[in-house]
Amino acid sequence: MTLSRRGFLAAGSAAIAVSAAPLLERPVFKLAAAAETEPTVLRVANRTIEVNGKPAKVYGLLQPDDRPGIVTPAGRFRVRLENQIEAPTLIHWHGLLPPYGQDGVPDLPQALLPSGQSYDYDFPLKTPGTHWMHAHTLQEQQLMAAPLIVTDPAEAARDEQQVVVLFHDFSFKSPEELLAGLRSNQVMSGMPSDGGMSGMEGMSTMPGHSMTSGTAMDINDIDYDAYLANDRTLDDPEVFRVESGGFVRLRLINGAPATAFWIDLGNLACKAIAVDGNAIMPITGMPFPLAMGQRIDIRIRLPKAEGAWPILALREGAVERTGFVLATKSGAVRRIAPVGEQPTGPLDLEFETNLRAAEPFAEKPADRSHSLTLRGDMAAYAWSLSSASGQNRPLSVRAGDRVEVTMANDTMMSHPMHLHGHHFQVVAIDGRRLAGAVRDTVWVPPMRQVTIAFDANNPGRWAFHCHHLYHMAAGMMTTVAYQA
């Protein structure tokens, strides 16, 4: 089926052929626009998907017709969250700027939503871009996540096809089992357990590993059973049908709780145009890094010939990969192995250093500055944020302040640091000032330093944490607290 580039494509509708044998079609991944008057109903539900040929029970964030996620125009966010699972839960609107009390973080200040109950969210929506939603608990590991796309009326006339993809990591183990395995010192043995732990996998001599006092950078805590793109592996990837010679806008979301990726588009002509939902000056530089919690929008000009083009998400520091395929109507789609030949290197800050915000913050000196040291004990699997006021103590701000926070990573793992309730600008890397990207999540590699700036214009008490789910669960979380 041929789809107009003006249509908002969120899924391929055709099955693909592998070795000339057609595979069964699966339900397509589509997003629906939210109604302007009535709240969009979003159900927290149980689902079963197939992973590696086996059924897997997971969660979903679904509209009443089982379409995952939300697409809504900028203006107002009206959503009725219905909890239809057996456990209490709550959903965080990652990238939006809600008022305090509607952010979806348990006890900040909203309590978990009990099974069978609903809650109505209603607040101004001023942040067009590629965002997402997810549980702020271990439920996130069980695929409790979905895209949240806020469309910009100013871009409605642009002749380009939209493709939305959510990446995830998957384990047949429960997240509680994974965390218990990390805390049991199995991560230090170097011997994978049944849960797939290989915490010192970074001890190899892979190019790009840094060394400090004889200790190598540690890249991944967990070896997962699968890596997913819109719930699917490369054994049966999603195929998006596209028009030869046309423009495609990829909206890519890293919803993986503990895996960073390099995004590889092969030889396609493309430019990154936004990160974390905020426009940047267009930039090339493949492969593109995508840390946990981050998003990237990439504009592609497709070749005029018929064809099929795999878009791959390469697991950081490893050979595993996932992805999807762009293919014209008659483009032949061939099987792609779920592992590559060589491991990738660790994500770095080269791409970040070259990013420039399309709409940078107004230049002004900081009214208040904080220094945070990111700390960790791999043997105990304990993580923390230390400031002048103490370990994991709130960072105090006043309404109207321009606030700068310098984060120094004193661990041998990288940390994607996410601030709720605000967007920030990257203003320095290793002490070197720049007018970098406007984001909500920034990558801080081992023994590196990143400074962010934000305006204290949304009073409340806001979570500030590492977006590696198990680092956050093991202590790497604090708050930004407004003074009364």
Image (spheres, rainbow, N blue to C red):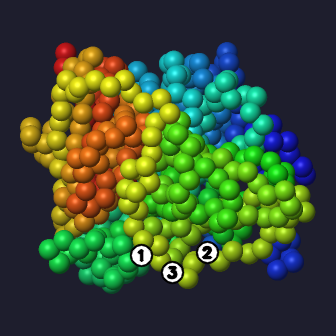
Image label count: 3
Labels 3, 1: front one: 3
Look at the numbered disc 1 and give the secondary structure of its residue.
Answer: loop
Question: Can I make out residue 41 in this image?
Answer: no
Q: Is residue 333 left or right of residue 361?
A: right
Residue beneath disc 2: 338
Q: Are marks 3 and 1 in contact (CB under 8 Å)?
A: no
Residue 233 at what x, y percent from top left? 64, 67
Figure check: 202 above or below 433? below
What amino acid type should be assigned to the residue bearing mark 2? Answer: Pro
Q: Which residue is mark 1?
A: 196
Q: Secondary structure at mark 2?
A: loop
**Three-letter amino acid code of the residue under disc 1:** Gly
Q: Residues within 10 Å of mark 2 (few under 14, many from 20)?
A: some
Tag 1 near tag 2, CB within 8 Å: no
Q: Mark on residue 342?
A: 3
